[in-house]
Image (cartoon, rainbow, N blue to C red):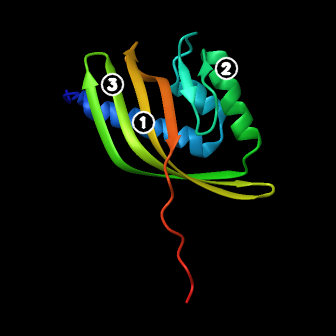
Amino acid sequence: MPETVLAIQSPDVALRDANRRYYAAFESLDITQMDEIWAHDDWVQCVHPGWDLLLGWAEVREGWVRIFSNTRRTKIALGAVVIHVEGDAGWVACTEQVTSAYSDGIDDVLAQATNIFIYRDGKWRIVAHHASPLPSGPKATVQ
């Protein structure tokens, strides 16, 4: 009889994968995918660059619905990713280069983000996202 081997991910690798799924949901502009990665508690929170605090899953979800309904396409590049796991909590700090296309143009934002996750029922769920805009570098000039 063949032996079944289960691959067990280390907590750091599993959290990195959860963070990847979060940004994949963001890029997909699909609220169903975003529903799957967030915890649905009344204390979860989200701050998008330039936005006020969204508190509780209903507000956080509505914020994503607004973003998704006004965006035609989004591409995100991450940099300086730092991951830490402490028991059933983990966080990811990273830079986000978010390029979004809208009906009236394109927006490019560089932000420093922190994503906080909890491990619940065998899955990492995001409970807080905070992104603050970073100054963009100098504009290149054509000579």
Residue under circle 2? 59
Circle nearer the viewer, 1 or 3? 3
Badge 2 marks a residue whose secondary structure is: helix
Q: CA distance from mark 2 to mark 1?
A: 21 Å
For residue 42, side relative to residue 90 (left or right): right
> What amino acid is labelled 3 in the image?
Gly
* Mark 1 or mark 3: whose residue is earlier in sequence: 1
Local packing at callout 2 (Cα closer than 10 Å; few below 14, some 14-19, many 20+) is some
> What amino acid is labelled 2 in the image?
Glu
Can residue 59 be seen? yes
For residue 123, side relative to residue 5 (left or right): right
Q: Residue at x 32, y 31 (%)?
A: 14
| Residue 62 coordinates in the image, percent (x, y) | 71, 25
Q: Quadrant of residue 31?
A: top right
For residue 49, side relative to residue 134 (left or right): right
Residue under circle 3? 90
Local packing at callout 1 (Cα closer than 10 Å; few below 14, some 14-19, many 20+) is many
Q: Quadrant of residue 50?
A: top right
| Residue 107 coordinates in the image, percent (x, y) | 66, 56
Q: CA distance from mark 3 to mark 2?
A: 23 Å
Question: Which numbered dot is residue 19?
Answer: 1
> What amino acid is labelled 1 in the image?
Asn
| Residue 139 coordinates in the image, percent (x, y) | 54, 70
Local packing at callout 3 (Cα closer than 10 Å; few below 14, some 14-19, many 20+) is many
Question: Which numbered dot is residue 121?
Answer: none
- Measured along the vertical axis of the image, is residue 95 above or below residue 128? below
Q: Residue at x 34, y 44 (%)?
A: 81
Q: Residue at x 23, y 27 (%)?
A: 4
* Mark 3 or mark 2: whose residue is earlier in sequence: 2
* Mark 2 or mark 1: whose residue is earlier in sequence: 1
Q: Quadrant of the C terminus?
A: bottom right
